[in-house]
Image (tube, rainbow, N blue to C red):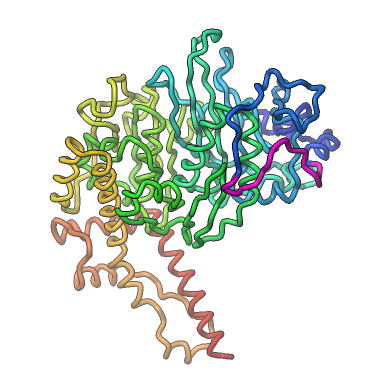
Amino acid sequence: MENSADSESSLAGSVTNHPAVSEDSQQADSIQFETRKTLDLHHSASSSPDLKIRPSLPALEFASVNLSRTRTLPLRSPKCTPSTLPTLQGITFEVENLERLRRWILGLAIVDFDHELGPSLSCIFPLLPLYPFEAENIAFSAFPDSTLFKEGSETHSFRIREQAPRLNQRGSSLFDGRRGASPDGFVYGFSHFNQVKAPTSKRGYSQRCIVLLTQHPYPALFCALLSQLGPLYHSHGDAILEVASHNIAKWPPPLPGTTIELGFLGSVLHVELPRDMDEQQLGNVAHLQAQPERDSHLLACSPPFAAPSMIHIFGASLKHLWSIWECLVLCEPIIIFGRSPAWTSMAIWWLRDVFRPIPWAGDFRPYFTIHDREHSALVNERAPKAGLLLGVTNPFFEKACSHWPHILTLGGKSSVQGPPARLAGPSPGWKTKTHQRYTSKDRQLLQLSEATAVRGNTIALEEASFNLRRHFSSRSAALLVPLNRYLNTLIPRPSEASRTDTDLRLKPFNNTNFFASLKAHGAALPFKSSSKQREFYERWLRTPAFGLWLARQEDLVTRTLANTRSRQSQ
């Protein structure tokens, strides 16, 4: 499959019955993304909260091809060759609408379980160019390795590296701008998996996922969308894909730092977008306890709200969270075993969140499978990459990653989370081969968290989870206090600006001078001793996170000084 990506014909076009994009298929390419100025819809596509979803829609299998398209549901394309991906038949999308949609998401995909091939991407809407290995990666990442229920649903997420578009012989992209580049080079998938009994199936169950593909790491927002879209799709079918897509196409652009109203499937969401991906979005406890407000007012980058609480997910490791946080900010690789992709996704998004406001310089995979194209690059006999968080549910990884320095297995020692199940990895808890803690625990917070895990109700569990998140987010901010203090001494003074005509820049960072400042002024973190304090910062200055932080500070200071000089010269 990977070898096929080396030729232009490996691109899987997402238009029904058209061959993959290549030099010899320009006619199909033009048809594939033909500009349509009118839409032939059988229902309203407004993003208004007045949108009504009819409770009963005609069954897909009974739709007659002799009827007007305005009176039938969108039909799936027939099964295509391996070089093409099916989409919805008879549904056109104006170029302007497609461009507005792609500001938020790349598309909505349907993944079914094929008894011979396994998970298979059976539909994607709107049209989205994908290489065959990308479609396979999405399909396997959308499905859990195993299920813990006979009937039910769950939501999880995954992160896969974006494949750079290949160029044809004329030097232009095969995608031709139809699939916007991701800001961080990754595609994020949010999957709603559903399993119901099906006597006619060989497995006895029907399994299907609806997957939202996007370039934005907004877990709270997209999980909230799937909580509405998933059940409606499994009830009403493909028609909802079209409605949801047109809703999203009507949204305003996702401008950083704004709070916007988004209409979606009959509801209105108030969404706060971060100024950048390293901004902390914490909210408050009162916001969490107001259920209607929590559902309609979202902090886009915050971890998704779902049961069970983080107190239960980290159950057996609560007393080790301070060691886990230190390994996290020191960019140590951590493999995380969970009972389901939903659990690993929630845990890794939570860890990614408490890293803020430190710039993220590593890699994280909320749910990672052995079928991922980067499996051999990330899981091998060599030492794992710095800053890598890997969420897994397959027992294979226990042996394959036995040499990793830090292993976290989610869950508690008791069965408070549900019925007993065979879990991947070691027994729940935290195991480290190399780390010795530098900072002191907040023992009052730990005791409260442990007590809540045993006796707390839903509201108490959510409040305790929020308090843990706020505590470790504040520690991440406190880590930067000595660095920001020393950085202020490196900014050129106004008197220096008047003595030179060259552009002013931040003075070089000197480790010796920094540690002299640290010794004189101390740190904001509660270190066990001064020697532990120095050792911690010696290690942190060698992490990729420090390099990225310093580069951003240098850029910020340079731009600020240039703007100041420009105003003074006017």
Q: Looking at the picture, tell me which residue is in the foreground, 528 or 53.
A: 53
As displayed, is residue 407 above or below residue 102?
above
As displayed, is residue 390 above or below residue 77?
below
As displayed, is residue 237 above or below residue 189?
above
Residue drawn where x is 56% and y is 85% of the image: 566
Q: Quadrant of residue 507?
A: bottom left
For the image, the number of numbered tags is 0
Quadrant position of the C terminus in the picture: bottom right
Q: Looking at the picture, tell me which residue is in the foreground, 426 or 232.
A: 232
Q: Quadrant of residue 53?
A: top right
The question of residue 36 being in magenta is answered with yes
Q: Looking at the picture, how far across and down is residue 163, in whole percent?
A: 61, 40
Secondary structure mostly taken by the magenta-highlighted segment of the chain: loop
Residue drawn where x is 40% and y is 47% of the image: 292
Extent of the magenta region = 34-50
Q: Looking at the picture, tell me which residue is in the foreground, 85 or 249.
A: 249
Q: Looking at the picture, how far across and down is residue 444, in whole percent?
A: 13, 50
As displayed, is residue 68 above or below residue 262?
above
Instruction: Please state if 538 lies on the left or on the right of 382 as rendered.
Output: left
Residue drawn where x is 86% and y is 36% of the image: 27
Q: Residue furthest right?
A: 27
